Amino acid sequence: MANILITGASGFIGSHIAEQCAIEGHTIYAVLRETSSKEYLNIPGINFIYIKLNNRAEIANKLKAVKSNIGRFDYVVHNAGITQAKNVRDFDNVNFLYTRNLVEALYDSGNIPDKFIFMSSLAACGPGNEITLEPISDKSELNPITNYGASKLKAERYLKEQNKLNYVIIRPTGVYGPRDKDYFQYIKTILKSIEAYIGGKDQLLSFIHVYDLAKIVVNVVDSNVTNSTLFATDGKSYTSEEFANIVKSVTRKKTVKVVVPKWLFRTITYIAEKVSGLLGKTALLNSDKYKDLTSKNWSCSADTTFKLLEYNPEYDLKRGIENTYEWYKTHKWIN
Ligand SMILES: NC(=O)c1ccc[n+]([C@@H]2O[C@H](COP(=O)([O-])OP(=O)(O)OC[C@H]3O[C@@H](n4cnc5c(N)ncnc54)[C@H](OP(=O)(O)O)[C@@H]3O)[C@@H](O)[C@H]2O)c1
């Protein structure tokens, strides 16, 4: 069984990856910040390493110290990242520079892992063609439309330039499931009987349940797949209206449909961004969000992933939302 270093282990996706790796018998080394929550890291045998990813020398020293006790880190899952930021520089720092720092610190500490697994995003590709509505795939041109997507693509390109590191890049689409706070906001709006759309009801979406994503990561560890870029979805695509219908049927809610015109949403995000900028805060509604929500085609084909890993996701959206909704209720996130 392997020693696996996982960054961003305290977060939504990272905590599930850590759990799944531990279930498979691997030893987990969770990279945390002093401020990171351990709420979901109650995993027998887990080890914590406190590292600031902005400091290459510090990362190398800490890795060397642990390595001298355990031999080596066999795999690295670099999952830490931000999906929202005050500005482009913050995206670049966390999503690109920290990735580079970690890779260089691995070189410095003489610990080149068997694979460096990088949690990228479908945002690194950008949306699919709005006319043909062909799903985003390995063949699609890379055209990120958000600062977030651009920072992930920059990190991907850096990894592909490395000639002494085996990498696997994972590009998940929207990830939902227990512990997620983002789609939770959407479910809460439905629970308030509001079914909101930006521009129209026919945006094509794709999803992956976090349990399936965590299993994909473990399968990458256990497989021979290397130097590859893998999309991660549940294998289906859904219109925004189908998504709403599934949430409504699971929550048994009747709703009022509200279609917000694009121009109005653009104005709201513009004002929110300006006000947050003045207050030195990160705007939840921002121009990245506008671009995401108004791009028509986020459908994506993960066929290559399923074939290479011989894996089929266990959760389609209906089953996944049922599981997630149950979790929110059990954990009193909703009554
Ligand atoms: N959620 C999605 O739908 C989705 C889709 C595609 C890709 N992704 C990618 O998946 C990864 C995990 O996302 P998530 O949804 O699980 O987000 P999350 O819950 O916010 O977790 C982010 C993790 O990254 C760590 N992190 C953030 N900024 C950091 C910094 N400056 N230094 C060190 N660690 C830092 C956080 O540590 P703290 O706990 O200390 O803050 C946390 O452990 C990210 O790389 C994201 O881009 C997410």
Image: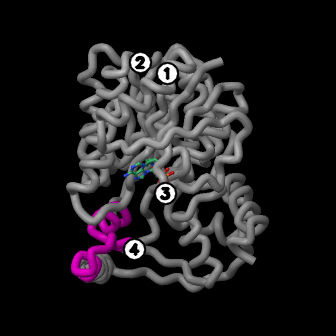
Residue topped by disc 4:
198
Alpha carbons under labels 3 and 2: distance apart:
27 Å
Marks 3 and 2, the one that precedes in the sequence:
3
Q: Are marks 1 and 3 in contact (CB under 8 Å)?
A: no
Alpha carbons under labels 2 and 1: distance apart:
8 Å
Alpha carbons under labels 4 and 3: distance apart:
36 Å
Label 4 element class: strand
Picture quadrant where residue 243 is located: bottom right
Please determine whether, in this image, residue 175 is positioned above or below residue 27: below
Alpha carbons under labels 1 and 3: distance apart:
24 Å
Q: Residue at x 56, y 33 (%)?
A: 29
Marks 4 and 2, the one that precedes in the sequence:
2
- Look at discs 4 and 3 and give the one toward the viewer: 3
Q: Is residue 283 magenta?
A: yes
Marks 2 and 1, the one that precedes in the sequence:
1
Q: Are marks 2 and 1 in contact (CB under 8 Å)?
A: yes
Please give left or right for residue 198 compared with residue 271 in the image.
right
Label 2 element class: loop
